[in-house]
Image (cartoon, rainbow, N blue to C red):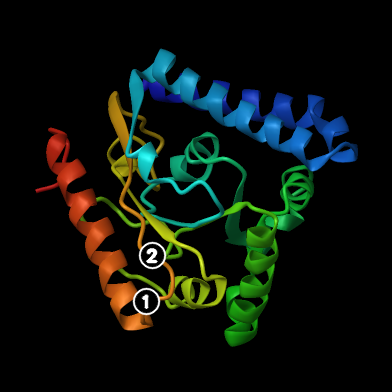
Amino acid sequence: MFRSLLFLAVFYINSALILILGSPLLFGPRSWAMAGLKFHAVTSIWWLRVIVGTKLEVRGRENLPEGAALIASKHQSAWDTFGLIPLTRDPAMVMKQELLSIPLYGWFSRKFEMIPIQRELGPAALRRMTQEAASRIAKGRDVVIFPEGTRRAPGAPPAYKSGIALLYDRLGVPCVPVALNSGLFWPRHSLTRRPGTIIVEFLPAIPASLPRKEFTARLQDSIETATARLLAESPDAPG
């Protein structure tokens, strides 16, 4: 617990310093701001390893296409929201609209041209999300989405939402499923951070233009099968 609390203090101080000292990046090119975002992620991952003993292993980078892609990741932890950033080229993440109202954080999210979604608007929110995502894909960026919409505990039954299938239909690019086990070491609703190895695995891409039902089945089977395997590799796996 001491190491967990020490890391949290360092993490928030590091984040605040980067936001404040990096604020001039709001007035420069987006690429400079994105470099600052990746710096924050890399330093956070480094501090987690040094203080807590949580390492990172990345598998399957060869499965990332050369062009723009839709990246659909399992979501177990707050770690995922920054840990995936330096693993992709120029990510545009789908995020909650309300986060844009946070001073500095929200301003930077707009600068990064992330993709906000206001879920309470229903179909209108999905249409806007799709339009925003299409514009990012047109710029050669990767669109990163958590298909379940919110964090799920390791081993919890899957709860995939319809937004991922809509994006896949409209964007016309390959979809790369991502499995991970971050929830074992950075649990949701907990201050505890645990030593071990967070594994992120990019799985073989699902080609564009499959029927929606086939895509959805392939995506869920790919992510859930690989995630179960990653959880089983750790002695901290549930059950």
Q: Residue at x 53, y 39 (%)?
A: 82
x and y percent of residue 210 in the render? 37, 76
Specify few, some or many for label 1: CA neighbours under 10 Å numbering under 14, 14-19, or 20 or more: some
Residue type at the position of mark 2 = Pro
Q: Is residue 132 visible?
A: yes
Q: Are marks 2 and 1 in contact (CB under 8 Å)?
A: yes
User: How many numbered markers are drawn?
Assistant: 2
Q: Which residue does the numbered mark 2 point to in the structure image?
A: 207
Secondary structure of the residue carrying numbered label 1: loop
Residue type at the position of mark 1 = Leu
Secondary structure of the residue carrying numbered label 2: loop
In the drawing, does residue 162 fall left or right of residue 202? right
Q: Residue at x 74, y 32 (%)?
A: 19
Residue in front for this viewpoint, 235 or 135: 135
x and y percent of residue 80 in the render? 45, 44
Image height of 161 relative to 15, above or below: below
| Quadrant (top left/top right/bottom left/bottom right) for the N terminus | top left
Q: Indicate which disc residue 43 carries.
A: none
Image height of 137 relative to 43, above or below: below
Q: Is residue 2 visible?
A: no
Q: Please identify the residue farthest to the front as the structure is shown.
A: 66
Specify few, some or many for label 2: CA neighbours under 10 Å numbering under 14, 14-19, or 20 or more: few
Measure the C-alpha gap from mark 2 to mark 1: 7 Å
Q: Which residue does the numbered mark 1 point to in the structure image?
A: 210
Image height of 142 relative to 1, above or below: below
Q: Please identify the residue farthest to the bottom as the structure is shown.
A: 123
